[in-house]
Amino acid sequence: MKITTRSTAAERPNTSAHRRDTLWLAALVHRISGVLLACFLPLHFLALGLAIEGEARLEGFLRWTDSTLVKLAEAGLVFLLTVHLLGGLRILVLETLQFTKGQKQWAMFAGAIALVLAIAFVVSFGV
Amino acid sequence: MTFRQFLLQRLTAAAMVPLIVVHIVVIFIATRDGLSAAEILERTRGSVGWALFYGLFVVLAAAHGAIGVRNVLAEWTGLARSRLDIFMWVFGLSLFGLGMRAVVAVVGAS
C-alpha cells in the first residue's frame, strides 16, 4: 500500500503564475469593468429620470455632481466604459476574424487609451 | 451560458460599439463647459433621433449587461442555474424599465 504524504509548496505547481499574464489581467479587467458599469447603469438611469419631475430637479442633481470627488468618479466611469469597449472589441475581432496576432499589445493599448481619455476628462475640468 | 445567450451577448456588443463611441464623444462635449440640465434637455427634448438612439442603446445595454453579469456570477459564485436565470431576467428587465423611463424623461421633458 502506497503511503501518500502532503506535498510541500515547492513540489506543487505554481497555480497563480497565470495571474501575471497580460491577457488574464485583460479578462479580469473586462469582467470587473462590466460588473461596475452594470452596477452604475441603474443609478445613471435614475439620475436622468429626474427630468420627469422637471428641468429644475435634474439641474439640482447636476449641481451636486460639480464636486471634485464626483468628477473623479466620472473620470473613472470614462475609463471603465472605454476599457470595456476596447477590450470587448478585441474579443469580438479575435472570435469572429480569428485574429490572434499581438493580443497582449492590443490589450495594453486598450488600457492605455482608456487611461488617456480618463486623464483628458479630468484635465478638461482642471480637477 | 447557453449558445443563444452567447450569441446575443456578442451581437449586442457589436451593435453597441458605434453607440458607445458617440456616447463618449457626447460626454466630452456635454461636460466641456460644465454639465447643465438645460444643455442636455435642449439637445434631447422632442428629438426623435435621440429617442431612437437612446432607446436602442437601453435595449442593447439591458440585454448585454444582464447576460454579462449572469456569466460573471456563474463563474465566480456557485449559484444554481435557475437562480442565475431569475437574476438575469429581473436585472435585465429592471435596466430596461429604468432606461426607458430615463429616455422618456429626457426626450419628453417639459
Image (cartoon, rainbow, N blue to C red):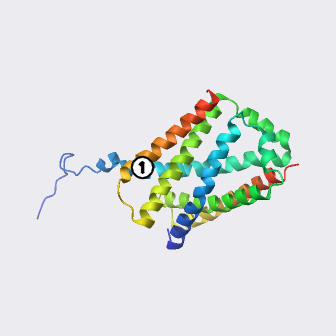
Chain letter for mark 1, please.
A
Give residue A70's position: percent from left, percent from top.
65, 34
Mark 1, residues whose alpha carbon is within 10 Å: few (<14), some, or many (≥20)? Answer: many
Left or right, B7 with reference to A28? right
Quadrant for the C terminus of chain A, please.
Answer: top right
- Nearest the eye: B31 or B12: B31
Circle 1 — which element? Answer: helix
Q: Position of residue A89 (x, y in %)?
A: 49, 56
Residue at the image point whose x is 71% and y is 50% from the top: A45
Residue A9 in view of the camera: yes
Kindly identify the residue that appears in the image at 80 percent across and 36 percent down.
Answer: A60
Residue A75, how many percent across, how many down?
59, 37
Q: Amino acid at mark 1?
A: Ala
Drawn side of residue A40 relative to residue A98, left or right: right
Q: Which residue is mark 1?
A: A107
Kindly tell me whether residue B66 is visible in this rendering.
no
Could you say which is closer to the camera, residue A9 or residue A60?
A60
The quadrant holding residue A1 is: bottom left
Q: How many marks?
A: 1
Residue furthest left as drawn: A1
